[in-house]
């Protein structure tokens, strides 16, 4: 379901995760590589750091030769074994939970599959924590057997190291599985947390892992140094302090940076999407790949844009029915403030009607008739819009257009006369099958909403409308098919419009419904 948006950052917050529409096979390879590299490297580095700290930083008797040899054999053996077990265990668990996401065909997950997919980071982190817990028990027992004086320090060091490494691994796993989470949450409205912990508790937990746990280790080291049988020296305590401070600075910063990135990344994507929407791109959306409050924010943004897109479509459709100017005026007022009635103003009215449409309809099929009508209406609407008028009504095969309402137009008479000339010229070429009569009149009308509170329309009522309709009937017998009231020409000349120079007088006539004569005008030959 990709939508267009210009110059957006990676939909998942990092280019390492690829595009949102990547094939399932490529997605599977990418996720497996990222998970393997990140998790294995994190655990190996964590094991090395724990070994260094336990060997040279703990204020306890130095390791004996027997202890060093035992650790030199046990650590690589256990790390290798744990990597193999973790890889098999993690791969089996992950593939089982994510099988739907790696199928060649698009498969929509059900609720159970979606929940299992979103729980994969927590499952993998729990697995790693259990492996570190086993390491804590194993190496503590090994130390109790070979060098009991170092057992407490070893157990605490490995245990705290396991907690910190598990926290970092959780963030890496969650990052690597964002494309899978996005597919799981596709077309799903996130109204509540679906998995994991929220942003606030997550911040607290990772502060505990990155800062609290190492500080607790420092406190334990100090307590061990204060024990009666301890032979820790000031030099050893200084080394412990330096090492623990280094761990806090490095791993605390790493955890904080990763945790912040997991929150800031989606926010930056949202910021870019908001800027795109602000610039008018309503086809923008964001990928929802988080099941916590961040996912609720992403999903809420998509809902908001969908609402804006729907409102814009309705406004566009409304504008096509009543005219963009009327639609804009109604939207500016609001539904509760639109009133029936109108205001008196001077404007120009253009009326155009087909000649011989009834005869044409009897001699041709409905499809041909509709095609001719659409071409006719297309020319009329195009010229009215080009001259800043409003197509107010389609009356069978006739059109009523207004110039000067609802939007003020200083040279409304000149615009109506110019539109009539251009319209006649184009209709003769583009719709030669039938003729057309065009009438233009200027005068005072009442423009406003007419009807009922539940159903009304914007229209104009007045002598100028009736005169334009009568002139249209007379224009059908005039060469060129265009006839205007001379008053319109005089109004255009008074407004300084050069359009008046294109018209000449054409006698006078008594229009139906009037007692006096009306001076007429036609385009200059």
Image (tube, rainbow, N blue to C red):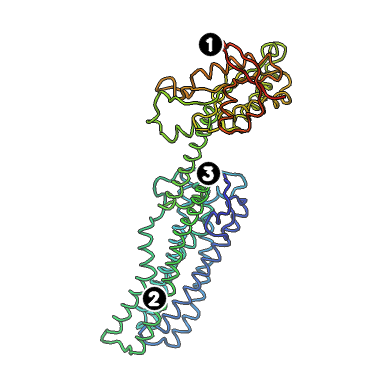
Residue 125 sits in which quadrant? bottom left
The quadrant the C terminus occupies is top right
Counting from the top left corner in percent of width and height, residue 412 is at 55, 30
Instruction: Classify mark 1: helix, strand or loop.
Output: loop
Going from the N terminus, do you reach mark 3 or mark 1 first? 3
How many residues crowd mark 1 within 10 Å: few (<14), some (14–19), many (20+)? few
The residue at 41%/75% (across/down) is 249
The residue at 46%/22% (across/down) is 446
Relative to 155, 258 lies left or right: right
The residue at 50%/51% (across/down) is 275
User: What is the C-alpha distance between the residues marked 1 and 2?
Assistant: 105 Å
The residue at 37%/83% (across/down) is 240
- The residue tagged 1 is 514
Counting from the top left corner in percent of width and height, residue 514 is at 53, 11
**Front-lying residue, 413 or 383:** 413
User: Vertically, is 10 above or below 247?
Assistant: above
User: Vertically, is 23 above or below 515?
Assistant: below
**Front-lying residue, 200 or 270:** 270
Instruction: Classify mark 3: helix, strand or loop.
Output: loop
Which is more foreground, mark 3 or mark 1? 1
- Please report contact status of discs 3 and 1: CB closer than 8 Å, yes or no: no
Q: How many marks?
A: 3
Instruction: Classify mark 2: helix, strand or loop.
Output: helix
User: Vertically, is 50 above or below 104?
Assistant: below
Q: Which mark is residue 157?
A: 2
User: Vertically, is 75 above or below 274?
Assistant: below
User: What is the C-alpha distance between the residues marked 2 and 3?
Assistant: 54 Å
- The residue tagged 3 is 282
Going from the N terminus, do you reach mark 1 or mark 2 first? 2
How many residues crowd mark 2 within 10 Å: few (<14), some (14–19), many (20+)? many
How many residues crowd mark 3 within 10 Å: few (<14), some (14–19), many (20+)? many
């Amino acid at each position: 379901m990709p939508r267009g948006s210009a110059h957006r950052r990676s939909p998942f917050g990092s280019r390492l995760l690829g595009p949102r529409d990547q094939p399932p096979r490529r997605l599977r390879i990418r996720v497996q590589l990222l998970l393997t590299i990140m998790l294995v490297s994190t655990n190996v580095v964590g094991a090395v750091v724990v070994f260094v700290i336990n060997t040279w930083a703990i204020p306890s008797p130095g390791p004996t030769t027997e202890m060093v040899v035992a650790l030199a054999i046990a650590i690589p053996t256990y790390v290798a074994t744990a990597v193999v077990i973790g890889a098999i265990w993690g791969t089996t668990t992950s593939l089982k939970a994510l099988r739907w996401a790696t199928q060649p065909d698009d498969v929509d997950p059900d609720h159970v599959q979606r929940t299992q997919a979103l729980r994969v980071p927590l499952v993998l982190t729990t697995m790693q924590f259990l492996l570190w817990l086993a390491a804590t028990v194993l190496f503590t027992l090994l130390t109790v057997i070979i060098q009991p004086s170092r057992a407490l320090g070893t157990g605490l060091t490995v245990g705290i190291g396991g907690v910190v490494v598990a926290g970092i691994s959780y963030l890496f796993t969650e990052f690597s599985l964002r494309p899978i989470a996005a597919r799981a949450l596709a077309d799903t409205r996130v109204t509540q947390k679906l998995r994991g912990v929220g942003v606030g508790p997550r911040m607290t937990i990772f502060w505990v892992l990155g800062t609290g746990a190492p500080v607790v280790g420092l406190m334990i080291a100090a307590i061990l140094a204060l024990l009666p049988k301890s032979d820790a020296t000031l030099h050893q305590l200084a080394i412990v302090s330096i090492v623990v401070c280094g761990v806090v600075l490095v791993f605390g910063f790493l955890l904080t940076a990763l945790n912040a990135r997991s929150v800031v990344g989606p926010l930056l994507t949202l910021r870019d999407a908001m800027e795109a929407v602000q610039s008018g791109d309503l086809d923008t959306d964001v990928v929802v790949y988080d099941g916590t409050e961040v996912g609720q924010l992403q999903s809420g943004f998509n809902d908001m844009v969908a609402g804006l897109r729907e409102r814009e479509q309705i406004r566009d459709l409304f504008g096509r029915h009543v005219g963009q100017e009327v639609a804009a005026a109604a939207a500016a007022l609001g539904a509760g403030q639109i009133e029936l009635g109108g205001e008196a103003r001077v404007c120009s009215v253009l009326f155009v009607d087909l000649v011989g449409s009834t005869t044409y309809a009897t001699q041709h099929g409905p499809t041909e008739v509709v095609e001719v009508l659409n071409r006719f209406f297309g020319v009329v609407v195009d010229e009215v819009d080009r001259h800043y008028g409003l197509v107010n009504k389609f009356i069978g095969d006739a059109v009523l257009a207004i110039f000067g309402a609802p939007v003020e137009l200083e040279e409304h008479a000149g615009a109506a006369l110019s539109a009539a000339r251009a319209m006649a010229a184009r209709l003769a070429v583009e719709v030669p099958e039938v003729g057309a009569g065009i009438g233009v009149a200027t005068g005072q009308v009442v423009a406003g909403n007419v009807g009922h509170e539940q159903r009304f329309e914007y229209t104009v009522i007045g002598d100028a409308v009736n005169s334009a309709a009568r002139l249209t009937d007379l224009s059908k017998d005039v060469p060129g098919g265009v006839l205007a009231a001379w008053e319109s020409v005089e109004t255009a000349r008074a407004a300084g419009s050069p359009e008046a120079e294109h018209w000449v007088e054409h006698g006078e006539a008594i229009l139906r419904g009037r007692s006096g004569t009306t001076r007429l005008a036609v385009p200059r030959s």
